[in-house]
Image (tube, rainbow, N blue to C red):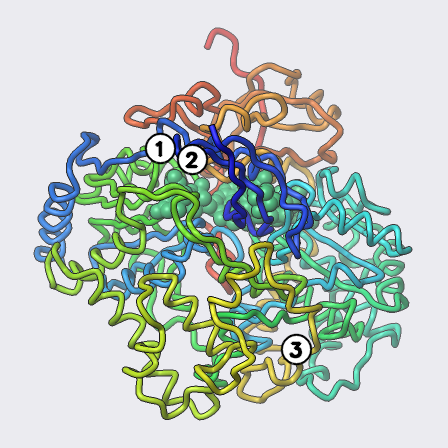
């Protein structure tokens, strides 16, 4: 065997670690994986998932051939089935009877970045669902209203800050989210070593909470109330920096937040008023500080209010857009807020709505929490899923499964026969993560340091690339039949983008002939050509000759350990796309939701609230088929505090019945002080072992799906699902059952 080393950015989470992969090319075998010490961003860090990337690639359960009704077929047969069955439903019931669900790996994959929007557009249905509405949609809504674009999201300048207040995030487990920062353990250690302070707000004693200077065990679902009290305290005590040239709406804040004093929120949040006032004062006094929040702030009933308040506090403490505060990255490619085509305009919502509950659209998406009812009671009869597992990931799981089972047609682009794709008429499999090139288009826009990093595919494959599959589907949906030319569709999608760009005054290619631009991009096709195009028109690009020193994909590619583009730089006001050209700190739509939160000040605070958790070796619903990643502490249990276990009469290791307004499950009890009293926790992505799946390892560790318990309710401003802070009861399994 001869070993050679390839460098590849890990696409499995948002951290973008550089991996050094030793391979024997002759036998197509991964010999060893380690963190790439020379990677300009991750400097040798990698987590167990990245190190298991060879096992993922080699997984015998990973689909290599298309399936029709669970039986392996040729690609021609598969496409014929797609055309007949999907075409049949569209012909009979119209395009609006078919939904599309785009799952999380779409943002970790260039096919998802460039082509799945075209699939959704080609489908022409209002029923576009994505994993965003079970995740970060509240942040997109607050960012769009405050900064003018849903992707203009400030990230904590973690390498320079003096004080980090972190809510509802556990980056020592998740490796960070909406904050691309490989080696979170090292970065947090460095923060404390330089005298900085880390405060973690979480109803669980998470890994990150354990590593913090201070842990605040907030009551689930109440972060927005607490953040409102921090902001109120800053304003009332005169600590807020009110005079800021790029900020509009400051005057409205004191009255709007007046009801949320530290005293008023103390009992509902379980945080004593003196702690709240102290944290507000510490934030104001720190030379630099950043407030950052994730799942625990977002996927709750006041998700948008909490997401908004985080940036309100970053503004009030004078930390928005300054080094050490919360800053806007400058990505090399594809960032809307540095694109010449982006126009400042009013954000419009609710242009259309779901049929059953009338839940309004946000950014041309409908809430995934409404998908089950739209299938069972609404007009949805068919569905396309791309890289998604809604059967496990979306609330109201029993109804979701019923809906998926009852569809007239389900077409899935995926690599496994799992809890969702088991219902599919046709599964179109995609190459492994090592058989495709990679560039982290989405996450470089959220990175705490500006970098660019291209990875070539490590292995060749006989399977079609995912982008080719998606182009073919676009062709089919646009009426070109199942034999549509991939090249024609690809070139059409890129040409459309180029035509828009040359019309934009500020573009480096303004006024150029689109055909010339296309020809300059040479022989490459698919994502490779697209990324080259975006780098060249981007902020560091060569502008197709306008700046001969600037970047192209070829020059980025020369840096196999990544290209360092420097620390984040201030971007106000240039980054803003609001009609006023200012940061809108008090959007009317957000203020209008405050009375709903005020009503929560007097709610009862007894009972148990369910929250989630992640495990270092988990990857949402699809990491459980890798033997080295499951077992040990990565198991599906219901964590409950000893006091609550006693009052519920449940014991460690035994089964319990957990019941919510939506459903009931059996879960194995883990009695532990890692959760605060009143809080119980279950990880998501479990519930394997179902008939018709082909996940032989996952089936042995099946676990329980907490989304049987989470319900159809949404955060009204964003339509986001409520996954955390769900009211439940816990009982022993009745004797004799
Ligand atoms: N190992 C691993 N890494 C992952 C993933 C994975 O499945 N496994 N998934 C990836 C994805 S898709 C995402 S979106 C990110 C998510 O990244 P994070 O948000 O950092 O991930 P979580 O571990 O879910 O952390 C959420 C924390 O919020 C806490 N929490 C729950 N409810 C509340 C609340 O009401 N208030 C507060 N303050 N805290 C609360 C939970 O106890 C938990 O510790 O992780 C990514 N990285
Ligand atoms: N209760 C609860 N529920 C949650 C969460 C929670 O914290 N608690 N977290 C939520 C969050 S943050 C998220 S992001 C969602 C995730 O929800 P989803 O995106 O629906 O689910 P995943 O588990 O990420 O499933 C990814 C699917 O893509 C497939 N896949 C992997 N790589 C590729 C690829 O390159 N191409 C294609 N075509 N397919 C691929 C996998 O086989 C799998 O079927 O779950 C959400 N659900
Ligand atoms: S932290 Fe994320 S990007 Fe880094 S190795 Fe692990 S899964 Fe891959
Ligand atoms: Mo996510």
| Residue pictured at 74% horizontal, 50% vertical | 269
Give SS at disc 2.
helix
Q: Which residue is mark 2?
A: 57
Q: Nearer the viewer, mark 3 or mark 2?
A: 2
Query: Badge 3: few (under 14), some or many (20 or more) residues near its Cα, within 10 Å?
Result: many
Is there CB contact under 8 Å for labels 2 and 1? yes
Quadrant of the image occupied by residue 615: top right
Would you say the beta carbon of the disc 2 residue lies within 8 angstroms of ligand 2? no
Kindly give the residue lying farthest to the top in the view shown.
736
- Depth check, front residue: 346 or 651: 346
Q: Which residue is mark 1?
A: 62
- Depth check, front residue: 734 or 201: 201
Query: Badge 1: few (under 14), some or many (20 or more) residues near its Cα, within 10 Å?
Result: many
Give SS at disc 3.
loop
Does the image show residue 726?
no
Q: Left or right of 273: which side holds 305?
A: left
Q: Left or right of 578: which side holds 708?
A: left
Give SS at disc 1.
loop
Task: Tell me the quadrant of ligand 2.
Answer: top left
| Residue pictured at 41% horizontal, 27% vertical | 688
Q: CA distance from mark 3 to mark 1?
A: 47 Å
Q: CA distance from mark 2 to mark 1?
A: 8 Å
Disc with the residue nearer the chain's start (3 vs 2): 2
Q: Left or right of 673: which side holds 356?
A: left
Rendered view: 672 above or below 714: above
In the image, residue 285 lies at what x, y percent? 90, 67
Query: Badge 2: few (under 14), some or many (20 or more) residues near its Cα, within 10 Å?
Result: some
Q: Which residue is mark 3?
A: 585
Disc with the residue nearer the chain's start (3 vs 1): 1
């Amino acid at each position: 065997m001869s070993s050679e080393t390839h460098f590849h950015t890990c696409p499995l989470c948002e951290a973008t670690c550089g991996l050094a992969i030793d391979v024997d090319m002759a036998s197509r075998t991964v010999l060893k994986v380690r963190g790439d010490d020379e990677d300009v961003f991750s400097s040798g860090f990698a987590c167990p998932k990245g190190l298991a990337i060879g096992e993922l690639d080699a997984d015998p359960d990973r689909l290599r051939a298309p399936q029709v009704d669970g039986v392996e077929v040729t690609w021609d047969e598969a496409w014929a089935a797609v055309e007949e069955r999907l075409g049949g439903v569209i012909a009979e019931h119209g395009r609006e009877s078919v939904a599309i669900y785009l799952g999380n790996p779409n943002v970790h994959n260039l096919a998802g970045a460039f082509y799945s929007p075209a699939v959704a557009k080609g489908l022409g249905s209002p029923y576009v669902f994505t994993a965003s509405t079970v995740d970060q949609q509240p942040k997109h809504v607050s960012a769009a209203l405050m900064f003018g674009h849903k992707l203009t999201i400030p990230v904590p300048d973690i390498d320079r800050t003096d004080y980090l207040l972190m809510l509802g995030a556990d980056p020592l487990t998740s490796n960070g989210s909406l904050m691309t920062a490989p080696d979170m353990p090292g970065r947090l250690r460095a923060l404390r070593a330089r005298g900085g302070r880390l405060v973690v707000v979480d109803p669980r004693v998470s890994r990150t909470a354990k590593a913090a200077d201070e842990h605040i065990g907030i009551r689930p679902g109440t972060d927005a109330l607490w953040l409102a009290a921090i902001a109120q305290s800053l304003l009332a005590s005169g600590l807020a920096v009110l005079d800021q040239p790029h900020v509009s709406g400051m005057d409205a804040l004191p009255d709007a937040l007046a009801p949320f004093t530290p005293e008023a929120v103390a009992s509902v949040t379980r945080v004593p008023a003196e702690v709240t006032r102290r944290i507000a004062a510490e934030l104001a006094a720190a030379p630099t500080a950043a407030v950052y929040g994730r799942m625990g702030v977002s996927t709750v009933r006041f998700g948008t209010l909490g997401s908004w308040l985080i940036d309100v506090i970053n503004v009030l403490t004078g930390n928005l857009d300054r080094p050490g505060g919360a800053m806007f990255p400058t990505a090399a490619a594809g960032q809307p807020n540095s694109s010449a085509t982006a126009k400042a305009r009013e954000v419009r919502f609710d242009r259309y709505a779901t049929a059953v509950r009338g839940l309004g659209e946000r950014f041309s998406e409908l809430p995934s929490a409404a998908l089950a009812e739209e299938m069972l009671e609404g007009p949805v009869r068919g569905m396309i899923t791309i890289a998604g597992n809604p059967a496990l990931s979306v609330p109201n799981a029993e109804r979701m499964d019923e809906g998926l089972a009852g569809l007239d047609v389900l077409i899935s682009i995926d690599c496994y026969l799992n809890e969702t794709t088991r219902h599919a008429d046709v599964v179109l499999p995609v190459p492994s993560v090592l058989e495709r090139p990679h560039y982290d288009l989405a996450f470089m826009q959220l990175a705490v340091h500006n970098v660019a990093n291209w990875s070539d595919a490590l292995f060749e494959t006989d399977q079609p690339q995912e982008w080719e599959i998606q182009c073919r589907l676009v062709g089919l949906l646009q009426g070109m039949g199942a034999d549509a030319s991939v090249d024609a569709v690809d070139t059409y999608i890129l040409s459309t983008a180029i035509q828009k760009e040359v019309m934009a005054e500020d573009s480096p290619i303004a006024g150029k002939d689109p055909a010339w631009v296309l020809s300059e991009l040479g022989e490459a096709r698919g994502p490779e050509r697209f990324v080259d195009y975006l780098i060249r028109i981007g902020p560091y690009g060569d502008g197709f000759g306008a700046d001969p020193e600037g970047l192209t994909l070829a020059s980025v590619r020369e840096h196999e350990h990544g290209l360092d583009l420097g620390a984040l730089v201030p971007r106000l006001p240039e980054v803003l796309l609001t009609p006023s050209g200012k940061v809108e700190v008090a959007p009317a739509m957000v203020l209008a939701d405050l009375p709903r939160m005020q009503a929560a000040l007097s709610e009862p605070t007894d009972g148990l609230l369910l929250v989630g958790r992640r495990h270092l070796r988990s990857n949402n619903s699809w990491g459980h088929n890798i033997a080295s990643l499951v077992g040990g502490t990565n198991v599906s249990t219901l964590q409950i505090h000893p006091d609550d276990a006693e009052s519920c009469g449940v014991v460690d290791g035994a089964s319990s019945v957990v019941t919510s307004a939506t459903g009931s499950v059996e879960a194995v009890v883990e009695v532990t002080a890692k959760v605060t009293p009143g809080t119980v926790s279950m990880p998501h992505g479990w519930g394997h072992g179902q008939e018709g799946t082909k996940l032989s390892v996952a089936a042995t560790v099946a676990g329980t799906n907490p989304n049987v318990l989470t319900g159809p309710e949404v955060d009204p401003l964003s339509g986001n699902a409520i996954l955390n802070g769900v009211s439940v009861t816990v009982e022993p399994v009745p004797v004799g059952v």
